[in-house]
Structures are given as C-alpha cells and as structure tokens.
Amino acid sequence: MSVFAKKVLGVGLSVVLVGILIGLYVANWATSFPPSTAATNAPTAGGGSNLTLETVAAVGPQLSPSHPTWVSYLARQNGQWVHSTTYIVPANTVVHVTLYQFDSPTGLRNPFLSQVQGTVGGTESIDGKLTNGIPPEEASHTFAVPELGVFVPLPGVSEEAKHPCEEAPCEPSKYDHRTITFSFKTGKKGRFRWQCFVPCGAGYIAGNGGPMQTLGYMGGFIDVV
Amino acid sequence: MTTTTESAPTPAPTHRPLWRRLIGFNLLTAVILAVVGYYLGWLLGHHIGGKSYSYEEKSGENDVALLLAYTFSVIGFLVGLGFANYPLSRMLGRPASMREKESAGIGRYFGLCTDHKVVGIQYLVGIGVFFFIGGLNAMLIRTELLHTTPTFVGPNQYLTLVGMHGTMMMGMMTSGILGPFANYFVPIMIGARRMAFPRIEALTFWLLMAAGFVLTSTIFFGGFPTGWTGYEPLNDQAVMGMDSYIMFFALVGISMTLLGLNMMATIITMRAPGLTWSRLPIFVWSVFATAVLMVLAAPMLVATLLMAALDRTINTSFFIAGGGGSSYLFQNLFWFFGHPEVYILALPGFGIILELLPVFTRKPLWGYRLAVSGMLGVSLMSFFVWQHHLFVSGINADLRPFYMLSTEIISIPTGFIFMCFMGTMWKARTTFKVPMLFCMAWAFNFLIGGLSGVFLSDTPSDTDTHGSFFVMAHFHYTIMGGLVFSFFAAIYYWVPKMLGLNFNEKLAKAHFWLMFIAFNSTFMPLFVLGMKGMPRRVSSYSPALHTLNVWVSISAFVLGISMLIFLFNVVYSLIFVREKAEANPWNSKSIEWQVPTPVPVHNFDRIPVFDSDPYDYGTPVGGSVGGGGRAAPAGAGA
Amino acid sequence: MTEPNHARRFTTIWAIATIVAMPIVILVIGPIMPPGNGSEQASGKVTDNTVLLAMATPVLLLVTIYLLYATFAFRQEKGAALEGPAVRGDARIQTTWIVVTSLLVLSLAGYGSVRLLSDYGAGSGSGPTPLTVPSGPKLKVQVIAQQWAFTYRYPQYGGIETPHLVLPVGEMVELHVTSLDVIHSFWALQLGVKADANPDVDNVAFVRPTKLQTFEIRCAELCGIWHGAMFDRGKVVSPTAFNTWMSQMQTKFATATKALPPYSRTYLPEPTRRGG
C-alpha cells in the first residue's frame, strides 16, 4: 500500500468513526420515547385497572431540563410522579382514571369538546360531583383518545386560588387542585394516541405548539396489551 | 486572461511546522470563528428578544437568539475561510488579484480556492456527503413505516426525519449537477480558463456546506414538523428547530442565486472565438436554462422565508389569519419558487443525458434545436404552473382550468427531450458502458414520472392523489429516477477526467442493476399506496396497507445497499487500486476530452477556436435533412 | 446482409402491443381504478382516470418498446468501432411529434376542465365561491378540522356538532371545510372528496354518495405531530337511518350544542396568535 493510500486510509477511517458516532447519536435521538407507565390492577371486586395522573402548569427543571416552563401530564408510579405519557393498560377492561388537575383554565377552542364523551356512563366526577360537561371557558386540559371515542374535559383551578401549584411535582395534599375521576373501556390490542384539546401550549400559535406537539407533555400513547 | 503560456514550475514549498501552517484563513479558522459567531449571536438575541416578547418567556424558546446565532456563525465561517479578504483589500485600495491557493497541494480542497476544477471536486464530495445523510434519513423513515403506529421513532422525530430528508435532498441536489459538473466543465467546454466570478463560485460551495451543517443541527433544537414545504401556520407554531430549516433554505437560496448568476455570466460572456450559440454543447444549454431559473426563483424563497422568520420572531402576521394574514400567501409564494425549483432539478439531468448519448451511440445529437427549445420552453413555462400544487386548497375556482392547461402544456417541451433521445438512438451503434446504462434507466424512470405527472395535472384526478403517496412516487421517479440517475451517469462518465482514475466496471454495473431494480421496486408500489388512501408524512397508516409498506421498506433497504456498493467502488477504485485513466476513454469528440488528464491549472495552452458543435459523429448520409449537419473534421484544437 | 426495415418492424410491434393493451386497460383495469364508485363524483373520476390511463398507455408502450428495441437492434458489434448515420434531425418527424403531443395534452386539458365543471368540482375543495353549483336541495355539512381531529356540524339541524360523519345516500351534500388553527385537509377516499381546511376560509366541496358503506376519512395535509393519527370512519346510510341517527345525536349532544357559538362559515376562536 502506498504512503498516499495509508494516509487516506487513516484519515478516512477516523472520518468514518466520527460518522458512526454521529449516526449513533442521531439514531438514539430519533428512537427515544419518553418512559411508559403501566396501569395498576384495581383491588375492588369489579376489577379493571387504575391510572393516576396529574396535570401541572410547569413541569420544572427536575423532570424536564430542556423545557421547564411547559405544561405537562405526569403519572403516578410507585408513589412517585414520573414524567410519562405512555400508559399501558390491559385489553377488554375498564380503566379507572383519577386525575389531579393543578393548572389554571385556558378555555376550549372548540366548545363541542366541553361535553364528556366515551366514558362509562358518559360522565366524569369533578370533586365528587358527577357531570356530563363543563363550561368551555373553564377547561384547563382535556384527556382525549379519539380512536376510542373518549373526550374528557378537565376544569381548571380558579385564578383566585390560595395555594396554586406553580411547578411539578404537585402533591394533592399541599396545593389547590380539582380531582377528576372517570372510566373508559378498552377493546382490542393496539397503540392509540391520546392528546389534550385545550390550547395550553402558551407562547405558540393557537396555543397548539410546544408541549402540545411534543411526546411526553400533552400527548402520548395508550398501549392496550 | 491572455494566452501566454504560464507553466512555470511552482516553487518547492518551504517546510514550516504544522502549527504555523494552521494559522491563516483556512477551515480551522473558519470553524473557530463560526463557534465564536454563534455565541455572539446567541448573546445578542437574548438581550434583544428575551424581555420584549411575553411569549418567549412562556414557551421558553428564543427564536431571535437562534436566528442571530446562525447568521453570525455563518458570517464568522465565511470570514474565517478568507472570503472577506478580497473585498476588504480592494476597499483599502490594493490592486485586483486573481489567484488564491491555485497550486498549493491537497490543502486547497479544504478552503477557499478559485480554481473552478477544485470547486467542482469540492462540490462533488460535499454534495455526496449530504446526499448520503439524506439517504440515511430515508432508511430510518422506511424502518418506521414497517409498523402501522409510531413504534421505532417517536412521532415528532419521524416528522423531523421526513422533513430533513426532503429538505436536505432538495437543497443539496438543486446544485447536484451544476455544482460539481457545471463548475468543472462549463469553462472547459466553452474554451475559457475560468468562470466569470471565481470567488463567488467558491462562495456558493461554502454557503452550501454551512447550510447543510445548519440543517443537521436542527435535532438539537427539537426538529421541525412541517416537512420540506414549511407550510404556515404550522411553521409559526413549531419549536425552535424550525429556525434551522429557515436558515438552511435562506443560505441555499443565496447559494443558488449566485451559482446561477455565475453560470449565466460565464456562458454569455466568456465563450471562445467561433463558439456561437448554435454550436454550444447541449449540457451547457441546460446549465444556462437552469441558471435563468435559479436567478429568478431562488430569491423568492429567501424573501418568503424572511417573512416566515419575521412571523416567528417579532410577531408579525403575514401568514396568520388571526392577525389579518393568510395561509394562502405562504403556499403561493413558496410554490412560485417551488415549481421552478423542480425544473432546476430536472433540466441539468436532461442536459447530461443528451450530452452523453452521442458519445455512446456514435451519432450526432438528433434534434439539437428542438432540445434547446425544449429546455428553454420548460424554463419559461415553469413560472406559469405553480398553482397545480394548490388545486384542492380552496383557491379561486376560476384559476384551476388555466393552471390545468399550463401544466399540460409544459409536458410538450419536456417531450422534446424524449424525442431527441429516441432520435439519437435510431440506427445507432450503441456501446452499453455504465454511463449509457444510467441514461437508458433515466429514460424509463422519467417517462413513468412524467406520465404520472399528467395524472396529477388533471384536477379531478388530482383530487384523489394530492397529498398522498402517489405524489411521492411521481416526484421520486422524476427527481430520483431522473436527476439522481443522471447524477451517477455524470459521475461514472466524468470522474476519469476529473480525478484521472478509473472506476471498477464490474462493481459499477452491479451498482447500476441493483439500484435500478431496487428503485423501481421501492417506488412503483407507492403509486398503489397513494391510490389506496395513504397520505404523505404519516407514521400511522391503515393496517390494510401494511404488507405493501413492508415490501417497499425492504426494497428501500436493498436500494441503500446498492449505494453502499457505489461507496465501496469509490473507496476501492479511487483510493486503493488507483488505475490511471486515459485522456479520452470514451473516445468523445467533446473538447473536455481533448485536454490532457489531469487538466492543467489554466485549462488550455492556447484558447481554442471552435468551428462546429461537439457532435461530429457518424458516417455522412447523402442528403441528410435537419439543422447543422456538416462533414467537417473534428472540432476544437487544443 | 441488408438492414431490416427498422421503422416498419418497430411500428408493427408497437401497434400490436397497443391493440392488445388498450382493451385490457379500458375494460379490466379501468373499472377498478380509484377512487371507486362510492359517490357520483368518485364514479366520474373512475372514468377520468380510465381516460387518462388509456391516453398514457400508447405513450408508455411507445417509449418502453423503443428503448428495448434500440437496446437489441442498434448495438455496436463486439470489438467494432463503427459509427451510426450522421443524421441531425428530420423535419417531418419533429413536426408530427409536436402536433400529436400538443393535440394530446390540449385535449386532456379540455377534457379535465369539462369534467371539473360538470361534476361540480369533482369532489375537490373549490373555495368559497365554486364555479358550478348543483341545483336542488343540498345537505349542508360543515367539516371543522382542528389539531388533531375532525368534527362535523349540521347547520340545518340546529347547528349540532358530532364527532363522526354520517351522510344519507343519494342526497347532494354541500361540504364546508374549515380549520380552527393550521392547514389540514379533509380526504374522504371512497367518496372522492378532498378539500383543504385553511383557517378563516370556507372551502366548499360537493358530493352525492351513491353507495351504502363505511368510508375512510384521513387528513391529507401535514398538520403536526398527530397528522397520521388524524383519521376517522364515516358512514353512508339510508335516509331513514340518517334521520334516526340525527335525532339520537341531538339528544346526546344537547349539552354541547348549547355551548357552541352560532353556525358560521369560518371561526377564529381565541387564542389565534401566540396565546397563553
């Protein structure tokens, strides 16, 4: 091999090595999903699964160093609030969702979604009271799984609340919140996306950018297994 | 330049230690100044933007900072390479100078060099690298499409990959032929020693490299969700990574404008004596037609993206209905650039194919005047068809029959190219060397692409296929099947002259056949997918289409393997084997093959005088009809 | 050995191929062309696509057969260095080609325009003021596209909004497609309808469904992260079933209907700019 070929080989191999490292970095970035949370089994006689969620006004630098000011959903796992929006639920079961809502209202852009759809009984329970809809301007977030027909509007914490939770993680015992419970039935296996329909992405056009368009904040998957 | 023979030997370089050689205006300085510029812009942006706009506090993102950071970074990069030296020295009253590192060894390929041949090779490698990156994005996309729901890559990363693939390819391949081959060969083909503006020529290359780097950096800022068309208002709604897209196309737009300007000036003013317009090689004509489009259409892109950047940074509402703007404005402005853009991609392909055919068929180019009018006709008509991208978008219904008519009409000059192709092959004596194989493949691929375009230009039919995989198949057949195949034809044809080395023919043939078969296997089913209802840019699709998508993905992986065969051939033949090429391996009568290999720095000892076009092949036939036939002996002297 | 008459040979091969292919294209492939026969507009487009394919087939055969013929008939003999005839053009062939291709494309443009206007836009979104409007009673349905779902409003039934689209068979439907935020596109594949949804724009499309079926609705314009997941299933049912469904919807969504703004051709609900 000539000297020239050796030089080129040396340079070429190092370029290829750097290229491969960059490629691995990009592949890692592309294939990264936020963590998944599995629904726990309900201890009641009726069976089903439990999912405990909360929505917060700002997710904070601990849980999201890159976007601390964004609104987000959090899930309860092993007594901790984790930054996860992929929920694993069993097929053909009733999923009971308990949701603690800490954010202030923004209002729905389409008031049609202020009526509860797709839940068991067509209702949700807000702070203990059953209702089938909320005033659209009071909505702070929604939990919607369009492919399963589930649309649940979540009312906001009043602006005059004494102890609003500014940043996650928010404990229900410490801060003002709304407690919302509802249940929905799952059918066959599959991966269904869920999203929020309230324009809560502050600072983005129509409120639908940023956290609304990034997995792990205001949208995720329901993995029916 | 005068015709004095200037072949004095270069003085032996004095040996300086490495660290001293690294100081100066070179790539290292450029990278350092780019980083400095980036942080300077970022700092400035935070001071300007951070406190003035409440939405920046809420979203936590500062688009002003990123755009300024990119701008200062690119300026630093260009200053570091030495582009500011000449303008500054002239402003200070120093005399004009020409040469810059024209004979300084291999280092001149990594910096500012005004030798058009060096710029050509820089372009070839640079565009090759980004083409490869775009191809890897495509492989990731096809891996995700093996699943019907987002499984392998997240949904927004998928959109970024799709956007990066399209944007990278469109931005890079517009200069795909003009960059490497026109820069290298147009001056030689017209008998000139250089391009009209050598420094601008080098600038277009380095702008493109900076642009490619800016685009790939989008993954650090969250990517962009709009695909290569960057439609508003989604564009305005996107996170910071969108600014990388805006900056990329701004730089590419400037690079394209300058490239086109340079080509036009060179071809119009620097032709050697005797080279009348009707004796110009058809490749040079295609470059000219493309250059006209670049100069007229690319500035539109830069202006449109400036408006988009203003919407994103200082909260104007050019494109936001809530502020009095219109989403239609962006669509129209973008496609006014976007349609000439696709002809910028197609025309050089036409030129390459028609340039190569006479060499391998041993016949003069059939219908030279027709080919030229076809190219110029396409160039002119391409400005009158853009609303066919907007047929179902709710534009004024009166306009649609007009745009249907104009789009159908543009297929007439495109058809001239096919007629010239077929006429040249009639009763020819064809040798099927690798470049010729790529020409034949071009004809088949562009035919399918063009015919599918006729379907898309018919508004009723377009209603079902717009925004679906049918459109994807159409433009992949015309752009990849057309331009990329002619790109490879040009590589196999001209690299023996550019680098003086031969490719391994067996590997080249394997590359061709695998690529042609895998390409058709990948993109032909996309027509069916589109007609069965799969929209573009989706990572969730109907389970009924799963099997077909798996077939397409596997074919795409095979297509990727064919590219690896090409890369292997490059490394094997050009680095290890290094078989020296003869001066004229294809026995071509075109002037670039009459100069020795490697091409001397000033191209010619004496400026040649032309007395015919370079298509003087064939045995004279009694009473031949048609333009320009003469039995004169071979063309230019050297 | 005398040269065979290539012109005659090639033309014969091409003519035979065309004569064999055309009936297959028109009679076998034509009827199964998309978008199917789910509506008047869709059936019209099956015809249009058949016509386009029939006109494209001879061209496709011409060039493809020529390429194959030239590959086999016009080769350089092994080891030889012969040249072909130095013919640079033929005025007759060039003129014929130009005239034939021009007639072909101009007639296609004319045919397309006629079909576009006679089929009331052929299912495409024709903007707020379509050129041809069908006479007679029309069922008005507003398709509201938002990030990332379609909802549907029926102004003739009290302005109620429903999450799924149900249409009665045989009736002319006037679709008004609009968006609340970014550009979407309402694509009902089997009905042959595609209309972009732009914010603050009312995009009108006409369709008369002719088959009882479930049809697929997809978003055909990239609108963000869940663009691919923005799909729905619509239904074409008999008029009586439609009325039953409508009264069910009016009962079910009574709460929501009270909260809705009055029906309007476009909506720009807050926030429209960079809200928060």
Image: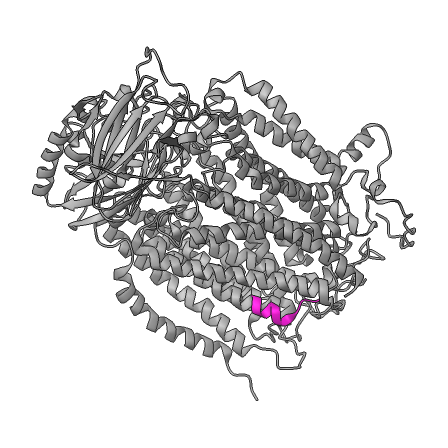
Quadrant (top left, top right, bottom left, bottom right) of the C terminus of chain B: bottom right
Q: Say if residue A84 shows up in the picture.
A: yes
Which of these two is toward me, B125 or B179? B125
Total marks in image: 0
Q: Is B421 in the magenta?
A: no
Q: Main secondary structure of the magenta part?
A: helix
User: In screen coordinates, is A171 left or right of B503?
Assistant: left
Q: Is residue B445 above or below residue C240?
A: below
Query: Can residue B300 be seen at all in this image of the molecule?
Result: no
Residue at x-position 26% and y-position 30%? A98
Task: State the extent of the magenta-drawn residues as a range.
Answer: B502-511
Q: Image quarter for residue C217?
A: top left
In the image, what residue occupies the spot 52% across and 67% down?
A: B514
Q: Residue B507, percent across and down?
A: 61, 69
Task: Indicate how the structure is coloured in the image.
Answer: one colour
Corner quadrant of residue B73: top right
Q: In the figure, is residue B5 to the left or right of B468?
A: right
Q: x%, y% of residue B321? A: 39, 26
The answer to whether residue B367 is left or right of residue B475 is right
Extreme bottom residue here? C1
Q: Position of residue B601 (x, y in %)?
A: 82, 54
